[in-house]
Image (tube, helix red, strand yellow):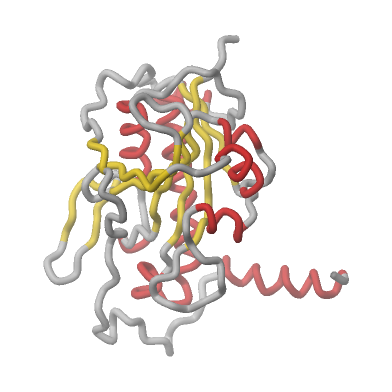
Amino acid sequence: MSNTDMKEIIKVRREVMKEQDTENITSDQALGLPQPSIANEKKSDMVIELPNSYESVVVNNNFMEVLNNRTSKRKYSEEIISLLELAYLLWSTQGVKKVIGKERKATMRTVASAGARHPFETYLFVNRVEGLKPGLYHYLALEHKLEYLGEVKDQTAKVTEAFGDQEFFATAPVGFVWTVVPYRSEWRYTVNAQKYALLDAGHVCQNLYLAAESIGCGACAIGAYEQDLADKLLGLSSEPTSEKENEFVVYAASVGKLPNE
């Protein structure tokens, strides 16, 4: 790639970070088109109930300490994460507090999202979580449950390859992977939806950092991944499309117990 070509690509991609003029664009919401689903439907018959009382799991309620101690931590012990701890992390990052609206519904969650559109889904690569077999899981946010999507053959090797050859992510007790369903936001915000979704992703991952810190765990965000490989592991397509059901990986983070110093 020539330097001129690279500069042109950078220029184009910078425009995503700007507020776009939508004066002459009518959204699908304004056109009265059906609202997209507020969450993905269940895909598996193997569903795990999650606990929803977290007072006993938080070991540090000092918010200033949590903020000051929050750093990216890539080294984890062999200690397992309890199901209660995992449930707390899932609730902290995508938990649904209530569903509002009658004809047009929205979810009020533990993280901010433009227009309460919440375009993300949470998947997990589990290695060491109490009561869970290793493999791929999906968080059913509306029900606060997990569904088991199946074993990933050669999981460590495939996840390492897909996520920037960062083995610490593949071998962590649990790897969070967030996908985006763009049309949930595009339905209302059209060409500004992509910017808003990327901003929202930051809200989600920061909550994971702070929640992990509060229970004595470490987290590390992952922005480097091979799109095709990561999407394939989740059974998704990376083909460019404007189809409304499009879903793809957009962010990830590892979580684990910290080794003794």
Residue lying furthest right in this view? 2
Query: Residue 241: x percent and y percent?
Result: 51, 77
Q: Quadrant of residue 159?
A: top right
Query: Residue 183: x percent and y percent?
Result: 39, 71
Choose between 181 and 134: the one closer to the eye: 134
93 to 1, vertically: above or below: above
* Residue located at (29% from left, 71% from top): 36
* Residue located at (20% from left, 64% from top): 105
Residue lying furthest left in this view? 102
Q: Is residue 61 left or right of residue 176?
A: left
Q: The C terminus appears in which quarter of the rendering?
A: top right
Q: Is residue 204 left or right of residue 164?
A: left
Q: Quadrant of residue 82?
A: top left
Query: Residue 42: x percent and y percent?
Result: 28, 55
Choose between 36 and 163: the one closer to the eye: 163
Residue lying furthest bottom in this view? 24
Instruction: Count every numbered label the image shows and give the total.
Output: 0
Q: The N terminus appears in which quarter of the rendering?
A: bottom right
* Residue located at (53% from left, 36% from top): 254
255 to 119, vertically: above or below: above
Residue lying furthest top in this view? 261
* Residue located at (35% from left, 43% from top): 148
184 to 118, vertically: above or below: below
120 to 61, vertically: above or below: below
Query: Residue 187: x percent and y percent?
Result: 35, 75
Choose between 41 and 85: the one closer to the eye: 41
